[in-house]
Image (tube, helix red, strand yellow):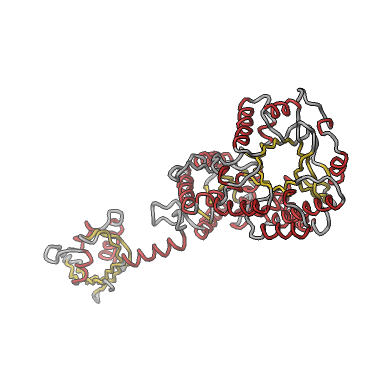
Amino acid sequence: MAHLGSWEWYPEQDVTERSDEYYRIFGADKALLSPSMSAILPQIHIEDQVRVKKALDQAQKQGLPYQQEFRISAPHNGMRVLHEQARVFKTPSGHIDYIEGITQDITELVDAQKRIRSLAYYDNLTGLANRQLFRELLQHELQRALRQDAQCALLFIDLDRFKRINDTLGQPAGDLVLQTIGNRINSCIRGCDVAALHYEDDQKLEQVARLGSDEFTVILTDIEQPEDAAQIVQRILEAIAQPIEGLGQEVLVSASIGIALGPQDGSDVETLIKNADLAMYAAKDKGRNTYQFFDKTMNDVVLDKFALENDLRKAIEQDQLELYFQPKINPITGEIVGAEVLLRWKHPQRGMVSPMTFIPIAEESGFIIELGTWVLQQACQINHDWQARGMTIVPLAINLSAANFNHPNLLPDIRRTLADLSLSPSFLVIELTEGILMTDAKETIETLTALKEMGIYLSVDDFGTGYSSLSYLKRFPLDELKIDKGFVQDIINDSNDAAITAAIIGLAQNLKLNVVAEGVETTEQADFLLRRGCNTMQGYLFAKPMPQREFEVLLQAGIDMRDMQAVFMVDY
């Protein structure tokens, strides 16, 4: 239904003839509404009254036609939006004879337009501006900054390890976290920072946007100096870090934030976004839960990482990768009882590339899956070769990444490798972090059970540094806990680390699990651990990670590893 009302106004007598639909639109009683054109003004929204009255006055006194939109309060119908257009008829002498108008109720059309706009410009989950609106706002602000010789800032916010929240608590919980974080970011932004092109809805704070997943952006306007942006970013980091309740358990979230200043870091949308994104990744590299300003050297860093990623993909076929072995020692007998397998990369130009450098690149690119498969196959092949040569062989421990552990080919690949080499699974140890174990409890149990049924030994690496819940220890078919070296290195001087380490050893003993201490470097540390029942150790006190040939020499010689660097201070 068109909801069109018509009217004719004779200004000289101030008499208006109105159609029945006009009265229905205004919810007015024909018998009670004064014929004066100004009789409808009290129903018009207070913010629109001056504008409507001005249009009527100009039509009456100057003969100017008009068309405009305004809001009214209609009895029984609430707030309505009307579109009105009018034209002026004059006598042959130029005197204004009458004014004719059409008034249309366009409330439904306006609502539909708002819904369409909301779908086009706003994120459904958080109500924040989406990528499209964000880009328009940023374009507008960059142009304004260039015209006025001003400065703006773009904040690129990425939540740290958000995927773990979704995987462990489920998507509904993840959605609640995103909504909460979006609200917190909004609350940190000052009113003067708003880069508002669209203002139909006063509740929208469109300088904050969600680009997708766990990425948010903020446009800050009129930044006088970089410190202004840094202060706001610090507020945002502190707000995000507050615990989130209502999810069955307290959830802590942190973020990494990149800052790019416009127009000096980018005078166009694409460049500024790219540079803010680079700065955000630099913040993650610094340890997360922090921020980083963009600087031009970051482009060089990205290019270097890209080149390193390409080289890493060639490393396997060009025989640049090799396995190192760090012995696991029985501290009472000095016997080598196993070894942790560590991946090393000897680059033809760069020399030895640290795993701290290339492992994160492999994880980001997805190449970690191929690397993990290669390490597994090589370790099994080496153990098989030792067996064929009649050497003493020991179990080799392999660290699996989350990507490898969750890959559907993991179990078939291990079965095929063991079968092809006729290798006993008792010589293979799989080490997993607590974070990997807690990713999806049901699937984790199924995978661990399958590995256990093969006869593979299962170890929890870096125990005590991940999740606080210990319930998985009784549910998962585990064999061993490895005490993280971060606890071991200070057990002599730090009572807290000493207490935690002793508790882990006691927990393992009660659960009938083996316990391994990593990072043992002094005889005092070894003494502390042994007195509390730790039966396996690895660390520089005994041996550093070494190439295959050096490790084979130790295995064949049967050297007492206690004599390698030091003798314990107590008689065992």
**Is residue 259 visible to the viewer in this orientation of the structure?**
no
Taking the view exactly as shown, the residue that stands out farthest to the left is 31
**Is residue 347 visible to the viewer in this orientation of the structure?**
yes
Give the percent coordinates (x, y) of residue 235: 51, 39
Give the percent coordinates (x, y) of residue 501: 64, 31
Taking the view exactly as shown, the residue that stands out farthest to the top is 570
**Looking at the image, which residue is at 73% across and 25% down?**
524
Is 398 positioned to the left or the right of 292 in the image?
A: right
Rendered view: 224 above or below 130: above
Give the percent coordinates (x, y) of residue 539: 76, 35
Is 431 positioned to the left or the right of 109 in the image?
A: right
Give the percent coordinates (x, y) of residue 241: 52, 40
Query: Where is residue 289, by image quadrant?
Result: top right
Rendered view: 488 above or below 387: above
**Nearer to the camera, 32 or 154:** 154
**Nearer to the camera, 438 or 233:** 438
**Nearer to the camera, 7 or 407:** 407
| Quarter of the image that includes the C terminus | top right
Number of marks drawn = 0
Rendered view: 78 above or below 525: below
| Quarter of the image that includes the N terminus | bottom left
**Looking at the image, which residue is at 26% across and 61% down?**
57
**Looking at the image, which residue is at 64% across and 27% down?**
498
Is 15 positioned to the left or the right of 490 in the image?
A: left
**Nearer to the camera, 296 or 466:** 466
